[in-house]
Amino acid sequence: EDREYLVKEGTFTKELIGRIQLVSKFSMFSDDEKKEVAKRLVSLASKRLKKFLDSKGKVLSDAEIGTYADEALSYYSEATGARGMKTYIDTTITSKILGIVKS
């Protein structure tokens, strides 16, 4: 059981584990899963810009979303997950999208 493993390994004390209702074990994302998360985050960013993009007659293609997702992948961290990627997409990628449309 995961609880016993965590206590045995000394990750958490038995008292703390006893207070937690559910213990879940997560596996690391594969490269394909990381890419899918990045694509979803870029798609969400473009949806937030939908009104602006529509007013300019612009829609991001799947290829553009893939390119931006590839760029954001280097900001994924095993320690913090997709947080760095999301921040990069919400700031830098969003600015790039806006810059493309404005020009």
Image: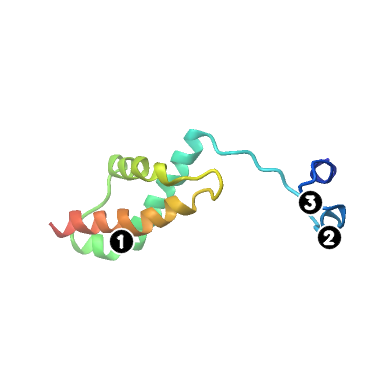
Give left or right: position of 55 versus 83. left
The residue that mark 1 highlights is: 50
Is residue 43 in sight in this rendering?
Answer: yes
The part of the image, by quadrant, that contains residue 18 is: bottom right
| Residue 10 location (% of width, % of height) | 80, 45
Which residue is outermost to the top?
31
- Work out which quarter of the rendered image holds the C terminus and state it: bottom left
Which tag, 3 or 2, sits closer to the chain's start?
Answer: 3
Residue in the image at 36% along x and 40% along y: 70
Q: Nearer the viewer, residue 61 or 39?
A: 39
Q: Residue at x 38, y 54 (%)?
A: 88
As helix, strand or loop, the secondary structure at mark 3 comes to: loop
Q: Which label sits in the foreground, 3 or 1?
A: 3
Q: Position of residue 82 (x, y in %)?
A: 49, 49
Residue receiving disc 2? 19
**Whole-Å distance between the Cαs marked 3 and 1?**
46 Å
Judge by depth and name the residue closer to the eye, 94 or 17: 17
Q: Nearer the viewer, mark 3 or mark 2?
A: 3
Tag 3 residue: 12
Amino acid type assigned to the residue bearing label 3 in the image: Phe
> How many residues crowd mark 1 within 10 Å: few (<14), some (14–19), many (20+)?
some
Which x, y percent locates residue 64? Answer: 28, 43
Q: Amino acid at mark 1?
A: Lys
Looking at the rendered structure, the kind of residue marked 2 is Arg
Asked if residue 48 is positioned above or below residue 3 in the image, the reply reads: below
